[in-house]
């Protein structure tokens, strides 16, 4: 089996972005005309990593990284939930911090479920569309392919996350505002970073001596093999 110099580093960075984004998602923030959960500031990078992984290493290796992120996000979420459920030390100096932790992660079960479902569906949609478009275009028009796959993946991701995590918590108009803000912001980040993504993809293809085409790939998301 071929080995790669940078695949492990990209995997680690991808998982770190995923977990940090989901913790930051517990706060809804306002940035200029945008209203979104805090995780949106960093989460678009996960889709950029997804584009790089699929473009350079192919759908099958991207699938393994997506499942790795899924498993570690679930582990982090279960840990946070367990800590929040355990009784805190009965000390007046400690109690305020314990209560703040419990309040911060009080939405964790719903946020975790929404994050896991949205991440899983969105990342696989993104990877699938990019891989198929690459074969159809014979490897040309990477910018259009990266943007097209992001438009699909982010729509799936954002919609599922908001419905599962916040439906019934916020009124419908707030959810609509958050969807529009999240979607426009995330796609905008992809566009802004596209020249850098181009450069990284080109450098990785040369460094790894790889430019994978998924002509005979089994796109079943539940298959972890090659």
Image: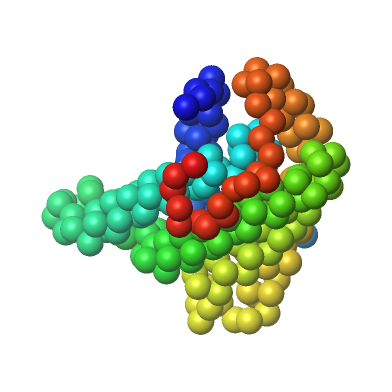
State whether residue 108 is above or below residue 130: below
Give the colour scheme of this rendering.
Answer: rainbow
Pick the front one: 212 or 72: 212
Q: Residue drawn at (81%, 33%), measured in percent from left and top?
A: 195
As drawn, the residue found furthest toward the front would be 216
Q: Residue drawn at (16%, 59%), measured in percent from left and top?
A: 87
Q: Quadrant of residue 148?
A: bottom right
Pick the front one: 205 or 169: 205
Residue 195 visible from this viewpoint:
yes
As drawn, the residue found furthest toward the left would be 90
Q: Quadrant of residue 118?
A: bottom right
Q: Residue drawn at (45%, 53%), measured in percent from left and top?
A: 223
Give residue 207's position: percent from left, percent from top. 65, 18
Q: Residue drawn at (83%, 46%), measured in percent from left and top?
A: 137
Residue 52 visible from this viewpoint:
no
Give residue 21's position: percent from left, percent from top. 52, 48
Give residue 216's position: percent from left, percent from top. 63, 47
Label count reads 0
């Amino acid at each position: 089996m071929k080995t790669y110099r940078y695949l492990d580093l990209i995997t680690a960075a991808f998982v770190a972005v995923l977990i940090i984004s989901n913790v930051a998602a517990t706060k809804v923030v306002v940035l200029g005309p945008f209203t979104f959960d805090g995780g949106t500031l960093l989460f678009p990078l996960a889709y950029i990593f997804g584009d790089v992984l699929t473009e350079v290493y192919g759908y099958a290796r991207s699938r393994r990284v997506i499942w790795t992120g899924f498993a570690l996000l679930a582990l982090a979420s279960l840990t946070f939930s367990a800590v929040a459920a355990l009784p805190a030390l009965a000390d007046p100096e400690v109690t305020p911090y314990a209560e703040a932790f419990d309040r911060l992660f009080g939405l964790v079960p719903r946020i975790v479920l929404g994050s896991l479902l949205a991440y899983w569906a969105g990342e696989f949609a993104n990877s699938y569309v990019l891989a198929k478009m690459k074969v159809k275009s014979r490897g040309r028009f990477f910018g259009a392919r990266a943007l097209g796959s992001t438009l699909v993946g982010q729509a799936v991701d954002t919609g599922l996350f908001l419905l599962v995590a916040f439906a019934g918590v916020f009124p419908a108009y707030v959810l609509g505002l958050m969807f529009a803000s999240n979607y426009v912001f995330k796609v905008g980040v992809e566009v802004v970073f596209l020249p850098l993504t181009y450069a990284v993809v080109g450098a990785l293809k040369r460094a790894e001596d790889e430019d994978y085409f998924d002509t005979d790939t089994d796109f079943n998301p539940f298959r972890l093999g090659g």
